[in-house]
Amino acid sequence: QVQLVESGGGLVQAGGSLRLSCAASGRRFYAMGWFRQAPGKEREFVAALSWSGESTAYADSVKGRFTISADNAKSTMYLQMNSLKPEDTAVYYCATHRSTTRAFNYKTSDMEYWGQGTRVTVSS
């Protein structure tokens, strides 16, 4: 069993920054990623981090603005979000992959464990 707890969401103006955290505990797991779900929309992939932490993948909509990373000593994954736009408004979730150690554009069905989500609101 894996427990994931996100934090760091909040209200920010367009152009601002936020850093989300995902604290993980439990058994050893595979690669991890961030997803988001805007009101009335399906949950979508945002970023992925390989098990080694050496490779990443990003959705086109966030490339160049978001950075995924991890502190293995703290068992915590981060999502640094810069140059935020109103369209980034969503609930952000971290999740563990079912089987891969690699980073690529994940599908929601690829993921095994999910956090409860943290809300990000970007005002214009």
Image (spheres, rainbow, N blue to C red):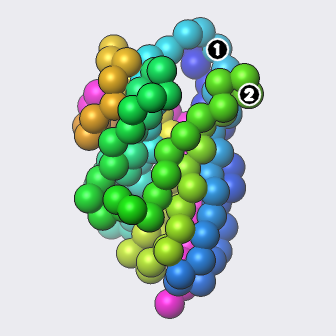
Residue identifier under label 1: 26
Secondary structure of the residue carrying numbered label 1? strand
The x and y percentages for residue 24 are 64, 27
* Amino acid type, mark 2: Lys
Instruction: Specify whether 31 is left or right of 25.
Output: left
Residue sticking out furthest to the right: 74
Q: Which residues are magenta?
A: 109-124
The x and y percentages for residue 65 are 44, 64
Q: Is residue 104 above or below residue 89?
A: above
* Amino acid type, mark 1: Gly
Measured in 3D between alpha carbons, the distance from the residue under mark 1 to the one under mark 2, in whole angstroms, is: 13 Å
Secondary structure of the residue carrying numbered label 2? helix
Q: Which residue does the image show at 39% across and 75% down from the upper left?
A: 87
Determine contact: label 1, label 2, CB under 8 Å: no
Residue identifier under label 2: 74
Q: Which residue does the image show at 50% across and 45% down from the upper left?
A: 68
